[in-house]
Amino acid sequence: MYYRRTLTDAQINRELLHVVFTTPMWWIVLVVSLGLVVAVAVAAVGYMFNQGLGVTGLRQPVFWGFFITNFVFWVGISHAGVMISAILRLSQAEWRRPMVRAAEIMTVFSLMAALTMPLVHAGRAWRIFYWIFPYDWSRGIWPDTRSPLIWDPVAIFTYLISSSLFVYTALIPDLAVIRDRSKGTWRYPMYAILSLGWHGSPHQWKLQGIAGILLSALILPVFVSVHSIVSWDFGVSLVPSWHVTVFAPYFVIGAVHSGVSAVVTLMVIMRKLYHLENYIWEEHIDALARLLIVVATGWFFLFWLDFVFALWTREEQEMVVWNLRLFEAPWGWLFLTFFITSYVIPVPLWLFKRVRRSFTWMLWTSLLVNVGMWLERFLIIVPGLVRKGPLVFDYGSYRPSIIEITIVVGTLALVPFLLLLFSKFFPLIPLWEEKEGQKLIDHIQLGNVKVPALVKEH
Amino acid sequence: MANRKLLGLFQEPQQVADAMNELKGSGIPAEDLDIYSGSPFPEGAFGEHEPHHRLYMFPLVGALIGFSLGLLYTAGTQIAYPLVTGGKPLLSIPPMTIIMYENTMLGAIIATVLGVLFESRLPKRSLGLYDERITEGYIGIVVDAPEEKADEAEKLMKAAGAEEVKHES
């Protein structure tokens, strides 16, 4: 039941463009603080490039650590954004309106954060160009397209370009609104160019609607493929515990679990900071929380399969890795933390309507999920590489260095930093979608209650 | 005789629908009438002319181009540097399909966006006859009428409730 507040177009423009036309103190404080964290991380990257990968904790035999964990984590976060937006657009769910833009833009910035990780991890980032691009850089050596390390950047670039175009196409009408509001100011030329001369004719609106459906339908298979391909980085290797057949769906649903949780976190913070009480309601996070219960339980099923497959086959190497994960410190403690935070605490809580409709509860439970899901990726990647097993003489552990921790924390600051910058220039909620929703408000008296009328939009 | 452009600004959708009926009744063809609004209305709300479009062709063509480029990239690089790795044959189809799939989808998506811009006739260098109030909730009717019909069109729009009728300068 969605009881929309009645808002005029002028009010929607004023409220949703408030931060575009004014600069609140909290915005400056947050941008400067997060910018400083990002700057420190950039300095750490510079130091690492100068000194070499020896300043990290990566040692034989563990060569994938915090950077790759963080890469998988951010690719995962990026997933739910476009997934939620595309599914809700395709199904024309009425409650999509306030969340599609923020979810889509979170996808773009999370992917950017993810992309920095393999570049940093490579140690000599500039050499990646030799390795990926189909160009005969030196001595006739071309990229090996049979390697998963090529599939990965191809998939991620596809997803990044697609998501960016998806965001931009839906942004054009809103850019025209800002253009019209900024005549005679320094902003006008920029928005006049970006809005491409949009008028809002019925033909343009019709194409905009079709584009939303078409792009959603095209981007959903890309979304499924990207995290599947990320899982194949692991799946096609011979490392114990990495080649379980359920890895692709396990990664995809894990990505949806962490990504939808991140959307909830973002919605709650946006509502508070940008005063979006008229747009983001209890009903929205309630709907997301119900979705999360299903997704989390689906994720739990695949996580269980991953575990059961190892037990069932009783392959010695698999058993060793699971033994390490579950019963040896510090892995066992990390495993317990991961499982409690990603499932045991949040899912039972979400069964209560009062929790689902509480912004505070949803903020903390969704953050908790992502603490757990970061650890999940770490526990998938590192224990398998430790190579602890019978007749292995070179097993070793992994301890992240301060440089790695700084860089990972930098990406945690980078995404909100970019989101804040975006909100200074573009609305986080699509103005035209909200205005369209306002036209369709109607309520019907049924007996003693007045209920929202259901509308078919197209 | 030359045509004159007019822009009538209305506050209510019903006024726009009435004005459109009157304008078409006065002999102005539907193709010479256009609507500007700050948010979408259901198709046909104002009895407007709907031009034909071929947007659905764009993703198909884009997908075909993307697929071809994917094939060129995967097959071409393996042929250009024929190194057998892991005992796997050159031109091994399964890994090639992964990149070809991504390129196919990328081609389709880029072409869809280009198609939207092309079919919407964007970008436009100038806004022409336009009013900023349109993105504040007003609805505009743009009339491209012959000189002798322009005054009548203005009167009809005002009679239907137009708050202002602007002329192309």
Image (cartoon, rainbow, N blue to C red):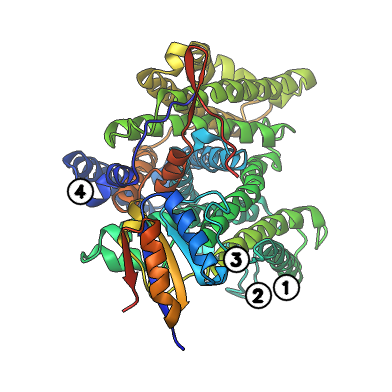
- Residue pointed to by mark 2: A140
Mark 1 vs mark 2, foreground winner is 1
Residue depth check, mark 3 versus mark 1: number of the one nearer the observer: 3
Query: Which residue is at the front of the view, B153 or B168?
Result: B153
Q: Secondary structure at mark 2?
A: loop
Q: Nearer the viewer, residue A326 or A372?
A: A372
Q: What residue appears at the point 58 percent right and 21 percent down from the top-left corner?
A: A325
Disc 4 marks which residue? A22
Mark 3 or 1, nearer chain start: 1
Q: Which mark is residue A138?
A: none
Indicate the position of residue A271 as horizontal and vertical percent values.
33, 32
Alpha carbon distance from label 2 to label 3: 38 Å
Callout 1 secondary element: helix
Q: Amino acid at mark 4?
A: Thr
**Chain containing the residue with disc 1:** B
Q: Position of residue A426 (x, y in %)?
A: 35, 52
Q: Which residue is painted at 65% across and 42% down in the image?
A: A224
Residue neighbourhood size for the residue with mark 3, other residues' Cα within 10 Å, grouped as few (<14), some (14–19), many (≥20): many
- Callout 4: few (<14), some (14-19), or many (20+) C-alpha neighbours within 10 Å? few
What secondary structure is found at the residue carrying circle 4? loop
Identify which residue is drawn at 56% across, 30% down: A454
Q: Are marks 4 and 1 in contact (CB under 8 Å)?
A: no
Which dot marks residue B115? 3
